[in-house]
């Protein structure tokens, strides 16, 4: 494997990391700024007031974005394995499709 191929794979992995973590980090940033503005206006400096909204929004965004995040990671991984130099992805896909078309009783015989 050439150094250029390794750098391309690492660059793609970093971009994927940013794309997947972006919605959660962005929502946490927005909520943090809004809570900070509310705290500055009302002069309430309670430490737990900053954490609870961030945690709630992070969990909500994760619940809604998780299917997209999972599909994006699966697509990236499949693409990575299928383009890996010297990979046997075609042989693996034909062997799994052959087994997936058979009935369940053949697995136990």
Image: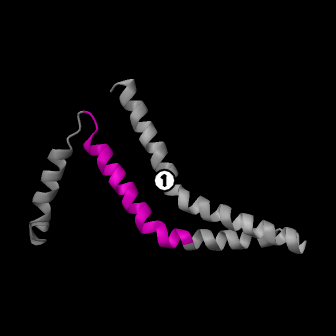
Q: Position of residue 43 (x, y in %)?
A: 90, 71
Q: Is residue 56 above or below residue 24?
A: below
Whether residue 46 appears in this view of the structure is no
Q: Residue at x 42, y 42 (%)?
A: 12
Observer-nearest of 64 and 42? 42
Q: Position of residue 44 (x, y in %)?
A: 88, 73
The residue under label 1 is: 19
Q: Is residue 16 above or below residue 54?
A: above
Q: Is residue 14 above or below residue 31?
A: above
Q: Is residue 6 above or below residue 81?
A: above
Quadrant of res 73: bottom left
Q: Residue at x 41, y 62 (%)?
A: 70
Q: Main secondary structure of the magenta part?
A: helix
For label 1, the crowd category at 10 Å Cα-Cα, with few meaning under 14, some 14 to 19 and many 20 or more, is few
Q: Position of residue 16 (x, y in %)?
A: 45, 49
Q: Is residue 102 left or right of residue 74?
A: left
Residue 73 sits inside the magenta stretch: yes
Observer-nearest of 85 and 43? 43
Q: Is residue 50 left or right of residue 74?
A: right
Q: Residue at x 88, y 75 (%)?
A: 42
Which quarter shows the C terminus? bottom left
Whether residue 47 appears in this view of the structure is yes
Q: Residue furthest top?
A: 2
Q: Position of residue 100 (x, y in %)?
A: 14, 64
- Give the secondary structure at mark 1: helix
Quadrant of res 72: bottom left
User: Magenta span covers which residues?
Assistant: 61-85
Q: How is the image coloured?
A: one colour
Observer-nearest of 79 and 104? 79
């Amino acid at each position: 494997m050439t150094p250029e191929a390794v750098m391309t794979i690492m660059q793609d992995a970093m971009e994927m990391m940013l794309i997947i973590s972006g919605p959660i980090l962005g929502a946490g940033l927005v909520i943090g700024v809004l809570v900070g503005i509310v705290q500055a206006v009302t002069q309430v400096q309670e430490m737990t007031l900053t954490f609870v909204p961030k945690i709630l929004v992070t969990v909500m965004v994760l619940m809604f974005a998780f299917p997209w995040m999972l599909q994006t990671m699966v697509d990236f991984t499949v693409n990575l394995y299928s383009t890996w130099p010297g990979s046997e992805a075609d042989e693996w896909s034909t062997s799994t499709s052959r087994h997936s078309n058979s009935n369940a009783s053949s697995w136990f015989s």
